[in-house]
């Protein structure tokens, strides 16, 4: 399997990615708790937090544009 990133680089993805699709994310998240004072981990946290906010807002806007309403919206 190959992955084409947003810079146009092609990367071969090994089969271990198919066994557990969250393996790398779990390792990255564990590093945040293992070494929370690291400037790299603090940068990762801030980047992930901003990305989570963007994803959340995108999902919210998609839901609203499709007129999907949940009981908790009232």
Image: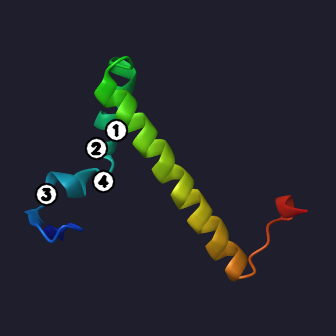
Could you tell which of marks 1 and 3 lies nearer the N-terminus? 3
Residue 71 position, x and y percent, is 85, 64
Residue 3 placement, left or right of 28: left
Depth check: 65 or 47 in front?
A: 47
Mark 4 or mark 1, earlier in chain: 4
Label 2 element class: helix
36 above or below 51?
A: above
Badge 2 is on which residue? 23
Q: Which element is circle 4 on? A: loop
Distance between the Cα atoms at labels 4 and 1? 10 Å
User: Is there a contact, CB below 8 Å, between mark 2 and mark 3?
Assistant: no
Identify the residue position indicated by label 3 in the image: 15
Percent position of residue 1, x then y? 13, 69
Determine the CA span between mark 2 and mark 3.
Answer: 12 Å
How many residues crowd around disc 1 within 10 Å: few (fewer than 14), some, or many (20 or more)?
A: few
| Depicted 65 relative to depicted 10: above or below | below
Secondary structure of residue under mark 3: loop
Residue 31 appearing in the image: no
Label 4 vs 3, first from the N-terminus = 3
| Residue 67 falls in image quadrant | bottom right
Determine the secondary structure under disc 1: helix
Residue 59 in picture, x, y percent from top left = 59, 67
CA separation in Å, label 4 and label 3: 10 Å
Give yes or no for contact between labels 2 and 1 (Cβ–Cβ under 8 Å): yes
Q: In the rendered view of the protein, which quadrant contains the C terminus?
A: bottom right
Residue 21 is marked as 4
- Cα distance in 3D space between marks 1 and 3: 17 Å
Residue position for label 1:
26
Picture colour scheme: rainbow
Q: Nearer the viewer, residue 10 or 7?
A: 7
User: Alpha carbon of mark 2 to alpha carbon of mark 4: how far?
Assistant: 6 Å
């Amino acid at each position: 399997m190959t992955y084409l990133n947003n810079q146009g680089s092609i990367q071969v993805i090994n089969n271990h990615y198919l066994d557990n699709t969250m393996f790398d994310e779990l390792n990255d998240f564990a590093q945040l708790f293992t070494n929370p004072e690291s400037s790299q981990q603090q940068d990762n946290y801030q980047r992930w937090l901003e990305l989570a906010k963007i994803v959340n807002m995108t999902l919210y806007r998609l839901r609203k544009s499709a007129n999907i309403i949940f009981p908790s919206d009232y």
